[in-house]
Image (tube, rainbow, N blue to C red):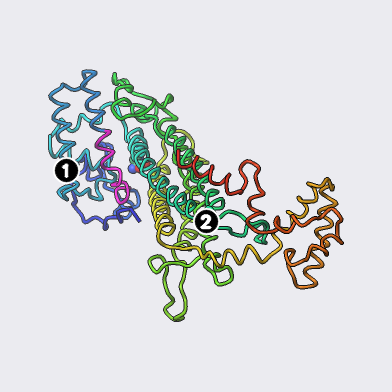
Amino acid sequence: MAQVPHPPAPDAGGAASVTGSGGSGWSDRFEEGLHPFIEGFNASIGFDRELLRHDLIGSRAHARMLSEVGVLTAVEADQLDQALVTIQRDAEEGRFVPSLQDEDVHFAVERRLIEMVGSLGKKLHTGRSRNDQVSTDLRLWLREQIDALQGDLADYRSALLDLAETHLETLIPGYTHLQRAQPLSLAHHLLAYVEMAGRDSERLAEVRRRVNQCPLGAAALAGTPVPIDRHSTARQLGFEGLCANSLDAVSDRDFVVDFLSGASLILVHLSRLSEEVILWASEEFAFVTLSDRCATGSSLMPQKKNPDVPELVRGKSGRVFGSLMAMLTVLKGLPLAYNKDLQEDKEGLFDAVRTTRDCLRAMTILLREGLSFRPARLADAVASDFSNATDVADYLVGKDVPFREAYQLVGRVVKTCLAEGCLLRDLPLSRWQEMHPLIEADLLERLEPRAVVQARTSWGGTSIDLVREALARHRQT
Ligand code: ARG
């Protein structure tokens, strides 16, 4: 997992806190420090360090804006800016490690700033609150992760497209109810997942637009008398717009739910593909072989080769759905505006982002080098069932026999074949003609698996030409 573990319980007399009163870190109304257990329970620094870079970016924009509106001098703003840049470098190089006494990343940065530039550091928090700050940080972080995730999705999509291109003419049984239904171009089957990935990507783009609204300047909940310029900070931070209501700005975590719901659907899609690969790799199907690079053995049974990668993806989907449920539950009873419950927005989100990215990458590797389809098995599978039965009915429909009548007739033929232990293609023309006088020799060609696939020429169907066109369309986007 991405998260930094909780720091160990604090020793007495740790790092100096931001406001440095009564050992509590709070204003002078507090006389006693926090109970040591509660200090750890309350802190988010164990995981919100993940937001450090974004917190510093947000603070730099805030400082610059304060100088634009005359709250800070240009010299003060420059000094703060340099210090904030140094904090980033110090963090990267291990010279700045937030401590548990800092409570969270925002206080940790403020403390460091005061250590570095003295009382000027105490001016940075003018006109803002951790409430608008944390939402700003989280939005900046998530925006960046969404962009990275779009890249992962694009890689996964192109692995599917490459595999589809190789298997345009390979046929695979198509199923409904997991019963053989009608044969398909394998590319058509894979392109179904490309369609899903396309929608996943569109959804993420929509979520990004809603994430990309700036809450900074809402202050604690009601705005601020400080003459801040919210448009300036929003612009500097690359936000597309401003959260229009200060209460909503600090309370809203819809954007987290939005994202988790988009991520859940990505995992739903990956999990369905995983399930198919698992089935295909079984001896019962034997449609694919797994390469050694993406499969594992059993510690006991020497003959085993297990599909761990798709199984893990299928299993990990639960974590992302869990984070979505947790976030919905956190929000549902919250009165406006900020409540500490909202601190629970982060760990699930961080985990969901990492899980989704990892699963996409694992599936991409699996598609690229983890499995190979077995053409002989597939050819055998599509040729040895009744998945051409609809085509006999369609043939008769072409001779003006009403569909339902044709359907009943073919049902009787299938029953006869089952009793005789043969397939539709095994029946000689004379038998067919006994069953219906309009049947001629051309029926037998139509029963070949490839002909069955080629017959599905309605737009969006599986005929090879249509699938080739679909593939080309996908390649262009
Ligand atoms: N660590 C807090 C969080 O993640 C930051 C905001 C704290 N605000 C407050 N009023 N206690 O939500």
* Total labels drawn: 2
For image coordinates 80% across by 51% down, the residue present is 396
Q: Compared with residue 471, is residue 178 higher up or lower down, i.e. above or below?
A: below
Q: What residue type is labelled 2?
A: Leu
Q: Percent position (x, y) of residue 85?
A: 17, 37
Of helix, strand and loop, which one carries label 1? Answer: helix
Q: What residue type is labelled 1?
A: Arg
Q: In which quarter of the image is residue 309?
A: bottom left
Q: Nearer the viewer, residue 268 or 64?
A: 268
Residue identified by numbered label 2: 273
How far is the residue under mark 2 from the one under mark 1?
Answer: 43 Å
Q: Which residue lies furthest to the front in this view?
A: 441
Between circles 2 and 1, the one closer to the viewer is 2
Q: In which quarter of the image is the N terminus?
A: bottom left
Inspect the magenta stretch and tell me whether residue 50 lies in it: yes
Residue 37 is marked as none
Q: Percent position (x, y) of residue 377?
A: 56, 67
Please report the bounds of the magenta region as a residue range: 44-58
Q: Percent position (x, y) of residue 254?
A: 47, 37
Residue identified by numbered label 1: 89
Q: Quadrant of residue 436?
A: bottom right
